[in-house]
Image: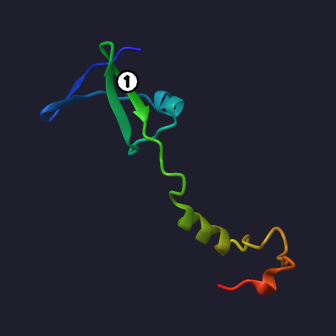
Amino acid sequence: MRSSLRKMGNSSGIIIPKPFLVEIGSKPGDEVDLVVEDGRIVISPVPGTPRARWAEDAKRVAAAGDDELLWPEFPNEADGELKW
């Protein structure tokens, strides 16, 4: 596929077709890394933090009432002797 560079202030930009973004697992607004390798510009997605948005997801799960323990709590024999 061919495209044209477009003037954007003092820089230039290019429109990246949605199928290309899907292919690398990115969407508009995501951060990407740009590097030049062998005369080519390589765009790579920046991996997110593993726990990003966990708090929001936990609230959503709790609001849906789906936050019950899957395994019932059961004590270990020596739990009564633990000192904190």
Q: Residue at x 29, y 13 (%)?
A: 39
- Residue 62 vs residue 5, the one in the foreground: 62
Q: How is the image coloured?
A: rainbow
Q: Quadrant of residue 65 in the image? A: bottom right
Q: What amino acid is labelled 1 in the image?
A: Val
Left or right: 11, with 83 as reference point: left
Q: Is residue 79 above or below residue 13?
A: below
The picture places residue 15, in percent across and down from the top left corner, at 34, 29
The picture places residue 8, in percent across and down from the top left corner, at 18, 34
Tell me the SS state at disc 1. strand
Q: Quadrant of residue 38 in the image? A: top left
Q: Is residue 9 above or below residue 49?
A: above
Q: Residues within 10 Å of mark 1 (few under 14, many from 20)?
A: few
Q: Residue at x 54, y 57 (%)?
A: 51
Among all residues in the image, which is located at the extreme left? 10
Q: Which residue is mark 1?
A: 42
Q: Residue at x 73, y 83 (%)?
A: 82
Q: Residue at x 47, y 27 (%)?
A: 20
- Residue 8 vs residue 35, the one in the foreground: 35
Q: Quadrant of residue 71 in the image? A: bottom right
Left or right: 7, with 34 as reference point: left
Left or right: 2, with 22 as reference point: left
- Residue 39 vs residue 9, the one in the foreground: 39
- Residue 79 vs residue 30, the one in the foreground: 79
Q: Is residue 7 above or below residue 71?
A: above
The picture places residue 54, in percent across and down from the top left corner, at 56, 62
Image quarter (top left, top right, bottom left or bottom right) of the N terminus: top left
Left or right: 84, with 74 as reference point: left
The picture places residue 81, in percent across and down from the top left corner, at 78, 85
Image quarter (top left, top right, bottom left or bottom right) of the C terminus: bottom right
Count of numbered tags: 1
